């Protein structure tokens, strides 16, 4: 009985060390595989009951575990959509076959890194067929509220590289100096003209015409320090979209700054923000002219008419030039006009026990009951790390350590084989007793 248990223990040792060697072989074979998580083998002794002073060998059993929560180092690349997770969390992906089938929401898998590039359909996918998933942004670039405990809101990230985009002008700033001498008695009273370009809702260029008309006082009245401002829109020729009366301060402390603004027509002047709103053909535009007593907008100084600071938002129609992902997981499209538009948000998925997930091929994992319920976070929120673009995660395998383990495994395997050989010789001796 004791000899038989020794034989069984030797056989168990061979099987356990063969299993460890298989794990080591897999680790070494994937030492250059981006995102690979090494497999670790643990041994557990099997203790049998001992009776009457006779010991029975129980042998050994091996268990393997993939250390999914163990990260490899990050290596820099030249592709903006090479992504890696720095810290805790996983990137949601789907298989390209599921995306191509278009059978509803594709199955979500998890990974920690991937070299994503646009395919023929514009999807960001890896060479191994993994498609990046994210929440689509609205037309204004905002991300709606999606459920965080399910993958139902996630969609394959699809980039239209031939996309055009323009942004309408909604705000402009007028920093203009009006000549104080034009409001003196005896001045000509000729209007001073200014044209400011804006972009309509279709990306077309239009102009707001601004006429500054000085109020010339009667003889003997000195100076008025007052102007009438009329605004017109080239999209609706001949129509005055706003008219305002401006009064400037001539005191020693605040001389040359706005004193009061009176609305004749158009949107009311907001004294708190120093803005007025006019309606062009495509909608309202907020124009900042400055607050009373401040010199950052319209002023009346000296004898020169000088547009000092005129700025506006919006842009004409432009072509998409590139796509990048920021550290918070936001996917942004860049256009040759200088504008940037948010198009997707890639969340990071976190689980209580990452090592409990089911490991699949292509360095992907699937949540399981052992891993716990997952939650979708914005990168950098909660326990998650951030997303690093222009980077890939290297394999977590340490080749030197694996080779050392291989030597130990080889020695252990040889020793267990020697045990079996010895037991065989002892059984042979037992058989020879009869002779």
Image (tube, rainbow, N blue to C red):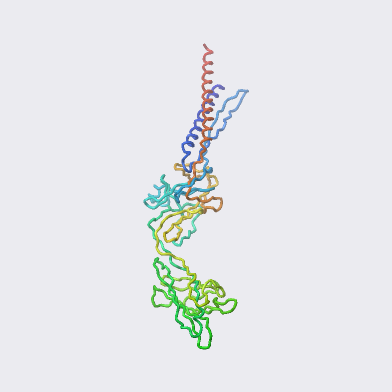
Closer to the camera in the image, 202 or 108: 202
Residue at the extreme right: 53
**Percent from the top left, x then y, of residue 155?**
43, 53
| Quadrant of the image occupied by residue 318 | bottom left
Q: Residue at x 53, y 88 (%)?
A: 220
Q: Is residue 407 visible?
A: yes
**Residue 141 rendering spot, x and y as whole percentages:** 46, 60
For the N terminus, the image quarter is: top right
Image quadrant in which you'd find residue 2? top right
Vertical placement of 13 versus 308: above or below?
A: above
- In this view of the protein, which residue sits in the foreground, 188 or 342? 188
Q: Is residue 406 left or right of residue 127?
A: right
254 in relation to 407, above or below: below
**Total count of labels:** 0
Using the rendered image of the protein, determine whether residue 110 is visible from the camera's viewpoint.
Answer: no
Percent x, y for residue 14?
Answer: 51, 28
* In the image, farthest residue toward the top: 435
In the displayed orientation, state which residue is furthest to the left: 120
* Viewer-closest of 195 and 355: 195
Give the x, y percent position of residue 162: 37, 57
Q: Nearer the viewer, residue 46 or 174?
A: 174
């Amino acid at each position: 009985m004791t000899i038989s248990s020794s034989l069984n223990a030797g056989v168990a040792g061979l099987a356990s060390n063969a299993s460890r060697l298989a794990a080591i072989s897999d680790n070494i074979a994937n030492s250059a595989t981006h995102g690979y998580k090494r497999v670790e083998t643990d041994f557990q002794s099997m203790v049998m009951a001992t009776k009457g002073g006779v010991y029975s060998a129980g042998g050994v059993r091996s268990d393997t575990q993939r250390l999914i929560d163990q990260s490899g180092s990050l290596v820099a690349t030249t592709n903006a959509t090479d992504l890696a997770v720095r810290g805790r969390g996983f990137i949601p992906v789907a298989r390209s076959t599921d995306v191509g089938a278009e059978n509803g929401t594709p199955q979500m898998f998890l990974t920690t890194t991937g070299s994503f590039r646009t395919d023929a359909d514009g999807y960001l996918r890896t060479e191994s067929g993994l498609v990046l998933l994210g929440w689509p942004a609205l037309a204004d670039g905002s991300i709606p509220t999606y459920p965080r405990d399910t993958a139902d809101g996630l969609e394959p990230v699809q980039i239209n590289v031939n996309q055009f985009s323009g942004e309408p002008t909604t705000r402009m700033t007028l920093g203009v100096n009006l000549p104080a001498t034009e409001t003196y008695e005896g001045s000509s009273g000729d209007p001073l003209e200014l044209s400011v370009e804006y972009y309509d809702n279709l990306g077309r260029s239009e102009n707001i015409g601004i006429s500054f008309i000085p109020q010339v006082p009667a003889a003997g009245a000195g100076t008025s320090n007052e102007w009438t401002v009329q605004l017109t829109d080239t999209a609706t020729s001949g129509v005055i979209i706003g008219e305002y009366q401006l009064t400037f301060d001539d005191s020693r402390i605040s001389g040359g700054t706005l004193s009061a603004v009176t609305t004749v027509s158009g949107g009311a002047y907001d004294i708190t923000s120093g803005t007025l709103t006019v309606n062009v053909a495509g909608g309202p535009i907020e124009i900042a002219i400055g607050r009373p007593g401040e010199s950052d907008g319209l002023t009346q100084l000296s004898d020169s008419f000088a547009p000092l600071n005129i700025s506006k938002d919006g842009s004409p129609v432009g072509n998409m030039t590139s796509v990048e992902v920021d550290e918070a997981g936001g996917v942004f499209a860049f256009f040759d006009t200088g504008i940037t538009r948010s198009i997707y948000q890639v969340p990071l998925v976190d689980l209580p026990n990452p090592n409990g997930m089911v490991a699949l091929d292509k360095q992907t994992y699937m949540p399981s009951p052992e891993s716990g319920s997952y939650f979708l976070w914005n990168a950098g929120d909660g326990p998650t790390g951030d997303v690093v673009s222009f980077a890939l995660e290297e394999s977590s395998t340490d080749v030197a350590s694996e080779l050392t383990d291989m030597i130990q495994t080889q020695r252990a395997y040889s020793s267990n084989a020697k045990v079996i050989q010895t037991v065989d010789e002892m059984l042979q001796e037992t058989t020879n007793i009869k002779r």
